[in-house]
Image: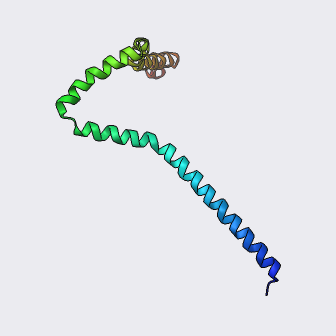
């Protein structure tokens, strides 16, 4: 059917292709393990937190606030913006809708005309 040379060439090509697939499989496994490291850390943290008693969790809240203030001391400005931002945005939208309505003729003036 096939000449011997072509069969040898196909066998060599098949072996090279299998080597390439094996190398790519190893590279993909290494990349997946690097990507999975943060998930593994998070899983460890969740397991530790589940082992803690509920009282310890209440103590962790003030500790996290203290750590946040020491690590991010300029967070006060951002915290203020996050706290008051939605109120300011909603007030601006309300004033904008009032201003838009004031430019339109009201229903009462249309009825009188």
- Relative image position of residue 92 (x, y in whole percent): 46, 16
Q: How many marks?
A: 0
Spot occupied by residue 84 in the image (x, y as percentages of width and height): 39, 15
x 82%, y 78%: residue: 5
Q: Residue furthest bottom?
A: 1
Image quarter of residue 23: bottom right
Task: State the quadrant of the N terminus.
Answer: bottom right
Q: Is residue 89 left or right of residue 56?
A: right
Q: Nearer the viewer, residue 55 or 99?
A: 55
User: What residue do we see at 78% from left, 73% from top?
Assistant: 9
The one of 106 and 18 positioned closer to us in this rendering = 18
58 vs 110, left or right, is: left
Question: 112 above or below 8?
Answer: above
Judge whether 66 appears above or below 39 on screen.
above
| Residue 49: % across, % down | 27, 36
Q: In this orientation, does residue 113 appear?
A: no
Res 81 → quadrant:
top left
- Where residue 8 appears, x then y in whole percent? 77, 76
Q: Nearer the viewer, residue 111 or 57?
A: 57
Asked whether residue 26 appears in the rendered view, the answer is yes
Q: Residue at x 71, y 64 (%)?
A: 16
Look at the image and name its color scheme.
rainbow
Q: Is residue 103 shown left or right of residue 91?
A: right
Which residue is drawn at the image coordinates 63% and 61% (left, top)?
21
């Amino acid at each position: 059917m096939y000449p011997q040379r072509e069969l040898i060439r196909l066998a060599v090509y098949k072996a090279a292709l299998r080597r390439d697939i094996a190398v790519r499989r190893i590279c993909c496994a290494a990349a997946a393990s690097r990507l999975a490291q943060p998930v593994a850390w998070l899983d460890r943290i969740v397991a530790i937190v589940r082992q803690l008693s509920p009282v310890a969790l209440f103590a962790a809240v003030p500790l996290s606030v203290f750590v946040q203030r020491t690590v991010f001391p300029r967070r006060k400005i951002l915290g203020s913006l996050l706290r008051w931002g939605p109120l300011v945005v909603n007030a601006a939208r309300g004033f904008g809708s009032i201003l838009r309505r004031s430019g339109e003729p009201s229903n009462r003036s249309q009825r009188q005309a």
